């Protein structure tokens, strides 16, 4: 691993700031001063110090974000702001990416990490990882809709969804519901309601696997997962393999 990436990931500033620090002679690897940002280091077998203090390197970062509307669930885009753009520099240095996608106008729980293995396992269709959404619906949602979702509905492209669990919180000209699904097709919740003649006007993701949105997070805010939350995700992934 390049020494500048390791130091940036360890909270010593942006790549640009780290390069300045290297040029100052403040960084040593196994006691030798290193000034070349491209120098490769093995964090597991070599000692890295900054101004005499040993660097404790960590490889992965796990962030829970309350995604705001109007932001893309992507790492980069030439024209629009992404969820990675709103991270602090020290977190962006880990090069995290969103685990799955939320539509641009959808709010709520979004996990960002650079742990590709965990991300792959949480997103694998074979794992059937549940995701719960809260939605406001234009139109009266009925028990018949719930039964239809339980059977699976046919979307506009002919795809028949896996069963979803619908909870009706209030029903009328404007309804409020919670829907749990185990897939992540494009605009799936919206298209499922379109399949029963109704329209989603507001959508928010509440949970993914055992991870629950921290409601104290304002839109656009994020925090690192607690050890308990990370453990529950890892354990959920392991349970899904059984």
Image (tube, grey):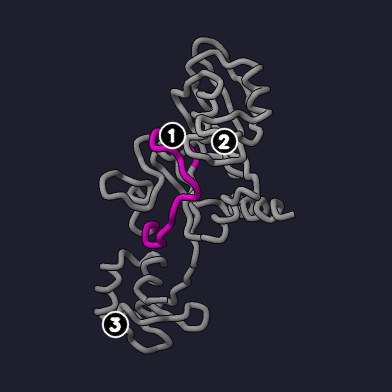
Of the pair 178 and 86, the residue shown nearer to us: 178
Query: Image quarter for residue 131?
Result: top right
Q: Please tell me whether residue 126 is drawn above or below residue 4 in the rendered image.
A: above
Residue lying farthest to the front in this orientation = 158
Return the disc, 2 or 1, that comes first in the chain's sequence: 1
Return the disc, 2 or 3, that comes first in the chain's sequence: 3
Return the disc, 1 or 3, that comes first in the chain's sequence: 3
Quarter containing the C terminus: bottom right
Residue identifier under label 2: 159
- Depth check, mark 1 against mark 3: the one in front is 1
Residue identifier under label 1: 106
Does the magenta-highlighted stretch encompass residue 101? Answer: yes
Q: Please tell me whether residue 14 is drawn above or below residue 33 in the rendered image.
A: above
| SS category of the residue bearing label 1 | loop
Residue identifier under label 3: 35
Quarter containing the N terminus: bottom left
Of the pair 160 and 110, the residue shown nearer to us: 160
Q: Residues within 10 Å of mark 3 (few under 14, many from 20)?
A: some
| SS category of the residue bearing label 3 | loop
Does the magenta-highlighted stretch encompass residue 93? Answer: yes
């Amino acid at each position: 691993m390049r020494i500048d990436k390791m130091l940036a990931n360890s909270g010593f500033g942006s790549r640009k700031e780290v390069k300045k620090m290297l040029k100052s002679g403040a960084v040593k690897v196994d006691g030798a001063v290193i000034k070349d940002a491209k120098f490769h280091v093995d964090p597991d077998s070599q000692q890295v110090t900054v101004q005499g203090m040993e660097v404790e390197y960590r490889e992965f970062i796990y962030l829970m974000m309350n995604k705001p509307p109007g932001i893309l669930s992507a790492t980069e885009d030439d024209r629009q702001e992404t969820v990675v753009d709103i991270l602090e520099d020290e977190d962006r240095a880990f090069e995290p990416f969103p685990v799955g996608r939320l539509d641009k106008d959808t709010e709520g729980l979004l996990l960002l990490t650079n742990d590709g293995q965990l991300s792959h396992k949480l997103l694998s269709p074979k794992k059937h990882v549940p995701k719960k959404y809260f939605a406001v619906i234009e139109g009266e949602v009925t028990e018949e809709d719930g039964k239809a979702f339980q059977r699976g509905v046919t979307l506009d492209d002919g795809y028949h969804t896996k069963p979803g669990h619908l909870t009706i919180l209030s029903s009328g000209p404007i309804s409020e519901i919670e829907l749990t699904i185990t897939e992540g097709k494009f605009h799936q919740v919206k298209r499922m309601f379109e399949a029963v003649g109704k329209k989603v006007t507001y959508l928010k993701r509440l949970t993914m696997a055992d991870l629950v949105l921290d409601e104290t997070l304002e839109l656009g805010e994020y925090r690192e997962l607690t050890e308990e939350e990370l453990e529950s995700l890892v354990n959920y992934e392991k349970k899904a393999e059984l």
